[in-house]
Image: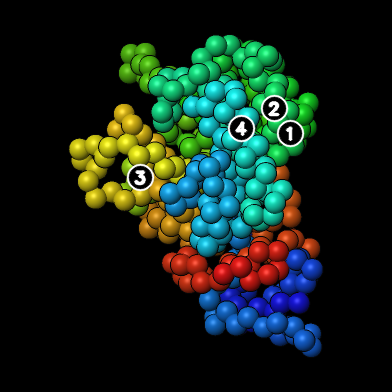
Amino acid sequence: MLAIINATLVMHDHYIPDATLLCDGGKIVDFGKELAIPEGAEILDAEGQYVGPGLIDIHTHAQGTYWFYEDAATASRIALEHGVTTVLPVVYFNMNKEDFIGATRAIQKVVAEGDFPNFGGFYMEGPYMNPKFGADRESNPWQAPADPADYLDIIRTAGKDAKVWALAPERENIRDFMLACKEENPTVVFTVGHSEATAEQVEELMPLGLRIGTHHTNATGTLPYMDVLRAPCVDEAVNYNDGLWAELICDSRGIHVDPYMLRTVRRIKGRDRIMLISDACVFGGPIPDGYEGVTDLCFDFAGEIAGSKLTLDVACRNMMVHTGASIADVFAYASYNPAQAVGLEDVGEIRRGNVANLVICDRKVNIKKVILKGEIAK
C-alpha cells in the first residue's frame, strides 16, 4: 500500500488540502483529511503540493525526438516523466496501407512486451481526412474514396485498441468506413479533423459516435463568404454542439490557437468540453521566417506548422497563462475531460476504485512525482 500524505488533492471541482490518499492493488482505495494510515504502508510526503489525476494525452505522434511507431518505449517513458499516465499514440495518414499497418503493429508489439505501460489505445488520425489539410499532406496516399479493400485490414489490425478515428465528414463513403470501425470496436469514438465539412455534415455523423473536434480551429474550413457572412463550418459545429469536445493545442506563443480564441472557446464550450493535447511531432523541416526563437512548434518539410514539441504539462502551464485557468481547470482539460470523451472509465479523476494514476506537482504544474497504477514511476 502507498500512502500519500500532506497533499492538496485536486478534485474535479474543488480541492482537499492537508489530505491523505491511499493506493492499494493499483487502485485508489481512500482519501480525505485525518485518514488513518495502515501499518506497513509506504509513505510519500507531498509536502503540501498538489496531487491530481495523471494527465491523459489522447493525441500525440511523438515525445522528445521519438515517433511512437519508431520507438514507443522511449516516447512512452518521456511522456510518463511529464506526468502523462495515459497516452493515445497517433498513426498518421501520410503512411500507405502497409506502413499504416506496420506502425500499428510496431506499437502493439512494444505494448505486449510491457515496455509501454501508459498505453491507452490508438488515436488513428486518418486515413480518410481532407487531403487539402495537414502536415506532410504532399505524402497523403489516401485521396481516393473510402474503399473496404483499402481500409478493412487497417481496422482489423488496430482492433479494439483503436479508441479514436479522425476523419473528414465530406469524404466519399465515409459512413461505410465508420460503420466498419464500429463493427470492430462498438465503443470507438470519431473526431472531425482536417476537414472542410459544413456544420450540417458534422452534425449528421454525431449519431454514429462523432464526439470530438480534432485540434480545434486548426486545419478546418474553407472560409467562404456570402456578402459579408462567413458560412458555418467545422469550427462553428464544434463550438455550437454541447455533445462535441474541442481539442486545443496550447503553445507558448498562442500560435496554434490565439490566446483570445482560447478564451473565447473556453467561454463557449465551458469547463467540461475542452481537452488539451500535445499533438507532438518530430518533423525536421526548416523554421520559416518570423518563427525564430519559437521552441515548442514543429515544422514539416514545406516549412509549415506541423504539430508541436509540447509535453502536456507544459500545455497546462500555457493554458493557465493564456486564459487565467486554475490548476483544477487544467486538470479537467488534461485528464478528466479526455477520459470522458474517449470512454476511459477508470482514470482521469481522484475517485475511490479508479486506477491510481496520479501526479504530484507545484502550482505551475511542474511535475515532481508520478504514480502509475499505484507505484512510484518518477
Answer with mark 2 or mark 4, whichever residue precedes in sequence.
4
Q: Residue at x 57, y 48 (%)?
A: 72
Q: Which residue is mark 3?
A: 297
Q: Residue at x 33, y 13 (%)?
A: 227
Answer with mark 1 or mark 4, whichever residue precedes in sequence.
4
Quadrant (top left/top right/bottom left/bottom right) for the C terminus: bottom right
Indicate whether 237 appears above or below 68: above
Q: CA distance from mark 2 to mark 1?
A: 6 Å
Q: Report the mark closest to the observer, 1 or 4.
A: 4
Q: Report the mark closest to the observer, 3 or 2.
A: 2
Q: CA distance from mark 1 to mark 4?
A: 14 Å
Q: Which residue is mark 2?
A: 155
SS type, badge 2: helix
Q: Are marks 1 and 4 in contact (CB under 8 Å)?
A: no
Residue 161: percent from left, percent from top = 71, 39
Number of other residues with Cα within 10 Å of mark 3, as a class: few under 14, some 14 to 19, many 20 or more: many
Number of other residues with Cα within 10 Å of mark 4, as a class: few under 14, some 14 to 19, many 20 or more: some
Q: Which residue is mark 1?
A: 159
Q: Report the mark closest to the observer, 3 or 1.
A: 1
Q: Which residue is mark 4?
A: 102
- Mark 4 residue type: Gly
Q: CA distance from mark 2 to mark 4?
A: 13 Å
Answer with mark 3 or mark 1, whichever residue precedes in sequence.
1
